[in-house]
Image (cartoon, rainbow, N blue to C red):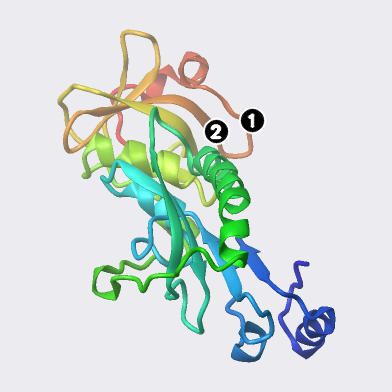
Amino acid sequence: MQPEKLNKEAVARIKEENPDLLILAAYGKILPKELLEVPKKGALNIHPSLLPKFRGPSPVQSFLLSEEEETGVTLMLMDEEVDHGPVIVQKICKVEGRPTAEELKNQLAEVGADLLIETLPLWIEGKIEAKEQKHKEATYTTSFEREDGRIDWEKPAEYIERQVRALYPWPGTSAEHETGGIKVLSSRIQESEGEPGTIFKTSSGELGVYCLKDALVVEKLQPANRNPMPSRDFLLGHKEIIGTKFK
């Protein structure tokens, strides 16, 4: 079930099923107390972070924006607060490569599914005890808006590269130029120095932008009202922007 509104009708329908167990994944709504008390074996939530870190609606994006190397999946017993209940089991995942939020979500979803298969029989048989979270160590996330994707070239290239991956596909990262805005779809870091925001052509023919530290090589971009394209193709038709600055 995935009711758009968790209203009286939806709650009544779940109660009618008289479930032994409820499992939530990527639902984004808080269950009312009357619903949490229905299942005999509890209401469980599979959350894509190592709680108590990154509670809330955007754990994957927030992790990618951070400098942490490990994340994972938590199976928890729900209570009336957001991602606050006791932990049943966790699985640590070391993130390799440069995944986008979409790619990492898919990876953690697979880990979470396997974790459920392994853990549920033990939970149902009472062989696992849920443990209280270390609430003082909790960190919280918020929903990202379009403005969060605006690139600030006065930040290090390392941060901006994480921003590009963390906010793909939504809300995406963008940069404003006097000739029009572009979305940065994929990028990498290059050791280089220059005035932040200044555009240059890399040795590989791609679009580069100097940042506070190092430079961001834009691998793929999307100009306003146009299809995505490699940045080297974009530069072939816009040589005049080399040496100019993003706003």
User: Any mark on residue 222, and which?
Assistant: 2
- Residue 73 on image: x %, y %: 47, 52
Q: Is 233 drawn above or below residue 85 in the view shown? A: above
Indicate left or right for 60 with 24 as reference.
left
Name which residue lies at 67% across and 85% down: 35
Q: Is 162 drawn above or below residue 25 in the view shown? A: above
Name which residue lies at 35% across and 65% down: 52
**Which label's residue is closer to the chain start, 1 or 2?**
2
Q: Is 52 drawn above or below residue 132 in the view shown? A: above
User: Any mark on residue 227, and which?
Assistant: 1
- Amino acid carrying label 2: it is Gln
Between 170 and 127, the residue placed more toward the observer is 127
- Amino acid carrying label 1: it is Asn
Placement of the N terminus among the 4 image quadrants: bottom right
Indicate left or right for 111 with 20 as reference.
left
Q: Are marks 1 and 2 in contact (CB under 8 Å)?
A: yes
The picture quadrant where one finds residue 122 is bottom right
